[in-house]
Image (cartoon, grey):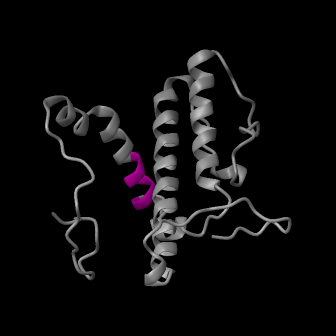
Amino acid sequence: MTDAFIPMSLSLVPLTPMAIATSEPTLDFLTSPGLRALIAERLEQIEKHGHLPDTDMGYQGAELALAAKSYIDTYIDLELRPDMVREPGDLPESWPFADLYWKEPSPEQRAKALIKGLALGLAELDRLLASLELIRAARPLSDQSEPPQFTAPPANGAWHL
């Protein structure tokens, strides 16, 4: 099994499956409208808007998770209060980016808000896992038997592994 998303300029590496679909419900999930919409949104973020996984690595303050939270919170607000109208410029408190990047969903677009939030969460997860892999790869081989452990930051606020 190879990862079809690795550019052809790189060598394809055999991957160990993380999970195997062995039942009809599992196969149904893999082709479900929700998963397809999530993947389509993430591909749009990358292809149309240029939010590449490599550039996502530059975020250090959970910005992608905060953006995900903003859209998911908006979905919840719209689901619980469909008549909610937010004033222009009244963005979610957790929105980490410039105001011009916020796309306010209407009540009819609440599913789109959830999809966008989940796709941003997926981007954050990919960023986190790639960061952890870089940390693991940078550690001396003799020290790679255990995954990195994160500790609370010291008084100066710097994180250490």
The range drawn in magenta is 41-47
Residue 74 highlighted magenta (yes or no): no
Q: Is residue 158 above or below residue 11?
A: above
Can you see residue 82? Answer: no
Q: If the image is split into quadrants, where does the C terminus sit?
A: bottom right
Q: How many marks?
A: 0
Q: Is residue 84 left or right of residue 8?
A: right
Q: Residue at x 45, y 38 (%)?
A: 115
Residue plotted at (50% across, 23% down): 108
Q: Is residue 131 visible?
A: yes
- Nearer to the camera, 3 or 107: 3
Q: Residue at x 76, y 36 (%)?
A: 90
Q: Is residue 63 above or below residue 140?
A: above
Q: Position of residue 24 (x, y in %)?
A: 14, 30
Give the x, y percent position of residue 13: 22, 73
Instruction: Check residue 43 for magenta coloring.
Output: yes
Q: Residue furthest right?
A: 155
Q: Position of residue 138 (x, y in %)?
A: 50, 81
In depth, the one of 88 and 64 nearer the eye is 64
**45 is higher (above) or lower (below) than 69:** below
Compared to residue 17, the image places residue 3 above or below, namely below
Name the dominant secondary structure of the magenta segment: helix
Q: Quadrant of residue 86?
A: top right
The N terminus is located in which quarter?
bottom left
Q: Position of residue 157 (x, y in %)?
A: 80, 65
